[in-house]
Amino acid sequence: MTIRRLLLTLALLLVPLSAKAEEPIKIGAVFSVTGPASFLGEPEKNTALMLADMINENGGVLGRQIEMIVYDDETDVNKCVLAVDKLLKKDHVVAVIGPSVSGNTLAVMNKFPAAKVPLISCAAAEKIVNPVNPWVFKTPQSDRHAVTRILEHAKEQGYKNIAIITVSNGFGQAGRAVLQELVPEMGFTLVADEVYGPKDTDMTAQLTSIKGKNPDAIICWGTNPGPAVIAKNRVQLGMDTPLYMSHGVASKKFIELAGSASEGLLLPAGRLIVANQISDDNPQKPVVTEYIEEYEAEFNQPISSFGGYAYDALMLVTKAIEMGGTADPTSIRDNIEKIDNFVATGGVFNFSAEDHNGLDASAFEMVIIENGDWKIVE
């Protein structure tokens, strides 16, 4: 369902309730609006506030306005914990979207079962939803599905020996665990396994070690700025080994940071960043096109996958409220779990009691960076 169709449905539901002045529905959000992950959190905050305004202008949800309460965790885990405590204990929100990064999500997610409030994370690590926490969901595609798409592409190229280089934070550790599992499981030999710190500014030593192992391809798992440094160091070392990136760099910010060193790099990405290249009959086409038009008109900034994660999270919460006819947190949780065939920016969601991500590998396109832009690999 596109946002316009959803808003029309919500507007119709408004009519019989309009005579009754009700309190707004408080929905919380924690994003890394500032700090190292601000390239994730800023578009997420912009998107959540923009979408809430759009919903309110069209009558709200069940005739009630949405009140978004957004806190900036500054990409700091301790500040994220404090923000979540405030949302749950003081603001009494009915649901929370975010945090932006995996480490912060993993640090706060166990607070939600006790509070009996659903969390819809905007971070990617598989550990957020595996094993399933009944009160925790997430909208980004899982790292397992991203690794699968990369290795399927590597197999098509005839590669045998794979090197990996991962960042030592929550996102990187989760991706590294999946890479260590799937690289051998899918028939490859893992010839190098290097790690770097999230604040490192030179990965020449790790790449030199990888170069000595002569891999057929390298897979880097991290978010900005580390992957951009690795892309530049690879060029500086004269390496032409194919380099794959994770979906954690799917924004123009990465291309800006890496510059010409980003040319030719490959990664799995959601269709949001290649909306103009997908076919008109793809069910995601109208959703991603409309979101891009609204966002770029409002903020005069290029779209990124990360704003889309917040878009999908808030849409799922409002859809669950609509389904249950109430903003009760338990009803929201129960109904998110029942959502299926829900077309959003990150893919087509099909949730269940056993699957709190609701996406599979088909949510990705393999893209290559050419001339400073994304291009779907045929």
Image: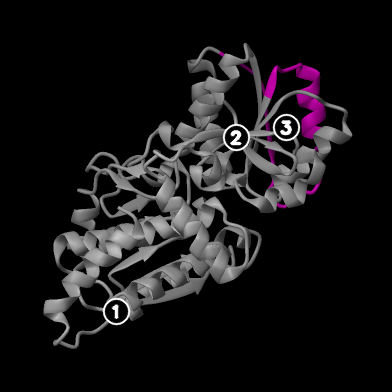
Cα distance, mark 1 to mark 3? Answer: 46 Å
Residue 212 or 281: which is nearer the viewer?
A: 281
Horizontal placement of 134 versus 97: left or right? left
Observer-nearest of 299 and 91: 299
Please state the extent of the stretch shown in magenta in the rendering: 188-217
SS at badge 2: strand
Residues 41 and 269: in front is: 269
Q: CA distance from mark 2 to mark 3?
A: 10 Å
Task: Give yes or no for residue 191 being in the magenta stretch.
Answer: yes
Dot 2 amino acid type: Val
Q: What element does badge 3 sit on?
A: loop
Q: Position of residue 11 (x, y in %)?
A: 23, 72
Which percent across, then down, holds residue 239?
A: 83, 26
Q: Earlier in the sequence, mark 1 or mark 3?
A: 1
The residues tagged by marks 1 and 2 sit, at their Cα atoms, a distance apart of 39 Å
Q: Which mark is residue 65?
A: 1
What SS does tag 1 mark? Answer: loop
Looking at this rendering, what residue extends furthest in the front direction?
A: 280
Q: Mark number for residue 264?
A: 3
Which mark, residue 367?
2
Q: What's the amino acid at mark 1?
A: Gln
Q: Tag 2: Cα neighbours inside 10 Å, few (<14), some, or many (≥20)?
A: many
Asked if disc 1 and disc 3 are in contact, CB closer than 8 Å, the reply is: no
Would you place residue 169 above or below residue 162 in this image? below
- Does 155 lie within the magenta span? no
**With 180 as the anchor, is 168 left or right in this view?**
right
